[in-house]
Amino acid sequence: MPVPLYTAEDLAVFSTIIARAACMRGWDADLGQGAPTAIQEVQCMQLGDALYFAGNGIEHMAIASYFRAFGVSDHTSLINCLKYSHWLLSTPAHQRSAVVGRAFAGGYSPQETATLNYAAASLVAHIPALSAQEITDARALVTTAALPAAPVRGLAWCLRKFAGAAAIAGLNRPAATLFNYPVNYNGLHEINLLNDSTNVHAELKLLRLLTYTRTQNLLHGTASDARVGGLKRTCAFCAAWINRFRPWIGLQYRVTLTLPANDTRAMGGGAGDRPSGVGEAGFGNYVQALFNGGANSLCVDVAAHSNDAEW
Ligand SMILES: [Zn+2]
């Protein structure tokens, strides 16, 4: 199925569930093994029929392991992954033993809860609840001591990993990467995770990819309505960068960029680098400053070039 038209708020919900679920467990290790990895940020961008995810620093590696475990390959399997993850995370701790079949620690942080509350309408609209039968079946996969039937082994492994249930001989971690895992845009794929380890904040990694699709003539004239939503509200430096980026990408390529509206969440701190490597040398000082790869700031230096004859 094509990817539905999601709002920036919808994308913030996806990012939030992924951020918590990916750092709950060491998804690259077998059942009962591996340590969780902290995740600062997950951001998601929709561009036409494709979703792009990015994390800060090397956090994409933990997200990749989580996606791999759940067999995320396309939009349908992504929503299935989010559905089961949100069910596990949102089941209250005192009900987990009865509902899920095992008591386990961990859930949404106050920051994550703030985003889910901010985008509550998106959560209800796009993350399906499990049916009574699905809950019964999931609980059976968590509590069984026998190897489940082949078609449900992937789900069984994920549920048991999430809930901290014991290993079963023959129940193995899904290891293949089924989603697209590129550094740069490399064609149309529904689910893309940016394999980008630069010290650039997640949302700017996504906007770098968006820019790359235009400067390299890869999506020229199509998919020109970009939406971006993440776990956290954009930090002050990224917001300043976006304030300079948005008018340029609009005028140069007729691309509109939408972020979560009326964002009441606290503004995060922290500083990352500016992106680079989009062919910026072919542009004027304004674009070269935006994409200089140096430490980001309030972008006063970019603003100084806003009246230049050329971008
Ligand atoms: Zn930032």
Image (spheres, helix red, strand yellow):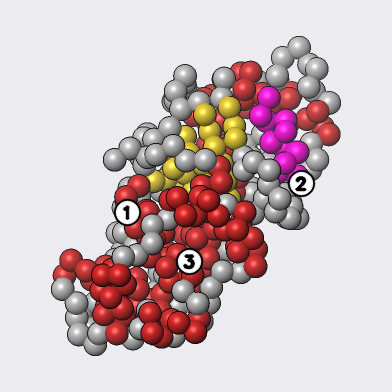
Residue that mark 2 sits on = 236
Residue 76 pos. (x, y %): 32, 50
Work out which residue is located at the far top of the displayed protein and give it: 309
Image disc number at residue 21: 3
Which of disc 1 and disc 2 is earlier in sequence? 1
Which of the two discs, 2 and 1, sits closer to the camera? 1
Task: Inspect this view and state whether residue 41 appears.
Answer: no
Q: Is residue 243 magenta?
A: yes
**Type of residue at label 1?**
Ser
Local SS, label 2: helix
Q: Earlier in the sequence, mark 3 or mark 2?
A: 3
Task: Report the residue marked by disc 1.
Answer: 77
Drawn side of residue 179 relative to residue 58, left or right = left
Q: Where residue 103 sits in the image (x, y, percent)?
A: 44, 85
Question: Percent position (x, y) of residue 207?
Answer: 58, 37
Q: What range is drawn magenta here?
A: 236-247
What amino acid type is highlighted by mark number 3? Ala
From the viewer's side, name the closer residue of 131 and 214. Answer: 131
Q: Residue at x 35, y 47 (%)?
A: 75
Q: Is residue 176 left or right of residue 22?
A: left
Question: What is the distance, in whole Å, between disc 3 and disc 2 at their CAs?
Answer: 27 Å
Alpha carbons under labels 2 and 1: distance apart: 34 Å
- By secondary structure, the bulk of the magenta-drawn segment is best described as helix
Along the viewing direction, whichever of 24 and 119 lies nearer the viewer:
119
Instruction: Say which residue appears at 53% left-offset and 73% top-offset.
Output: 107
In the picture, residue 139 is in which quadrant?
bottom left
Is the CB of mark 2 within 8 Å of ligand 1? yes
The kind of secondary structure element at disc 3 is helix
Horizontally, residue 26 falls left or right of residue 308, namely left
**Compared to 97, does 58 lie above or below?**
above
What quarter of the picture does the C terminus occupy? top right
